Image (cartoon, rainbow, N blue to C red):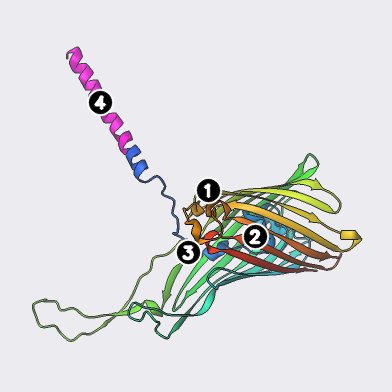
Amino acid sequence: MSRLSTLGLALATGMLALAPAGLAAQGTETNPDNTAYGTTAAEFLLFGAGARGTALGDAFAAVATDVSSLYYNPGAAALISGPGAMVSTYDYVADTRYSWGGIAFPFAGGSRTFGLQIGTFGFDNQPIYTVDQPEGTGGVYSVSQTFAGATFAQNFSDRFAAGITAKFVFDQLGEVNGTAFAVDFGTTFHAMLSDHPIKLAFVVANLGTDLKYSGDALDVTVPRQPADPTAPAPPQLPQPGELKTKGFALPTLFKVALAYDLITGESNRLTVLGDFNQANNNRAGFAGGGEWAMERLGGSNFGVAVRGSYTYQPANNIDVDPTLTALNDEENLQGLAFGGGLNYNTETFKLGFDYAYKYLGILGATNFFTLSVGW
């Protein structure tokens, strides 16, 4: 074979080798992001549990040591100092409401904790509109979404604790209902850094089965078709049938959170928090915030706290007409939250009230209220 033929063969081989790479690059350009936005159900599982956690964003998992830790980090529930209960509620968008309640009982000398929680979301008596009756059919429908969970947490050492939550999810959409089962798993590790407390947390939430639907609204009747299209049509004999629905995944969330006390005194504390999170229906996000708390005000049993955070979720990165709201920076402002709390503590009784404000972009803002009691 001549030198020219050898060179031609080498060039042809090189071009063939580069062809798959070129096709792969072309595919990347046409589909740069395959994130499964909007493909999960039961999004109310991400609505939170308390005003303190809402004000501190997703980063709260590292410092969740009250009853709301049943939701934010099952492992941190082992650090609850005594029995307690908590209820929270807020008005969501479009006249919907979300509420959460939990109760926790430490036992075995405080090394273990058992807790129960329930969360509900929905609305009632909404008019039904159809294409044939755009003014309304006269009927109404309701939506009720609920989850109920049980948590067990244990301290494995003076620095490390872990916990798990098993929960059932129920979704009632008019005459159709769905069910799913999920687990949350969380850990917490606390130590000292430069004589200041530092806490780390690892959490996986809503890991479970698909949400599958059934109900009377899926029952249909199908007209019987003639076997011979040219023959006279036989009497229409409806055949009973059932529409099959696709199962929808739950919004599974993975997060790693860190908290560090910049100031630690006998009656005051300043904590900064950070968080990295990854959901199965979104790209990776992050959160950051801070909490300043002061106890024993003026030597009394009262204490106060001020909190604030910002949570970035890539799915909120959208272009919005600035005329839609009074604010013209929806992408950067969505995820902003702040709030505060007032508490009364004695050796045998604790009472707390917390408030949080969270901005939801073009959907507006929500006000979260929490009442807690301990004994």
Which image quarter: residue 352? Answer: bottom right
Q: Position of residue 148 (x, y in %)?
A: 59, 70
Question: What's the distance in space between the residues labelled 3 and 2, CA to CA?
Answer: 21 Å
Give the extent of the magenta segment: 1-23
Q: Which residue type does callout 3 highlight?
A: Ala
Looking at the rendered image, the quarter that the N terminus falls into is: top left
Check residue 284 in the rendering and tell me which mark sits there, or answer none: 1
Q: Nearer the viewer, mark 2 or mark 1?
A: 2
Which image quarter: residue 88? Answer: bottom right
Q: Which residue type does callout 1 highlight?
A: Ala
Question: What's the distance in space between the residues labelled 3 and 1, CA to CA?
Answer: 19 Å
Q: Please give left or right for residue 213 compared with residue 149 in the image.
A: left
Check residue 54 in the rendering and tell me which mark sits there, or answer none: 2
Residue 15 is inside the magenta segment: yes
Check residue 41 in the rendering and tell me which mark sits there, or answer none: 3
Question: What's the distance in space between the residues labelled 4 and 3, CA to CA?
Answer: 50 Å
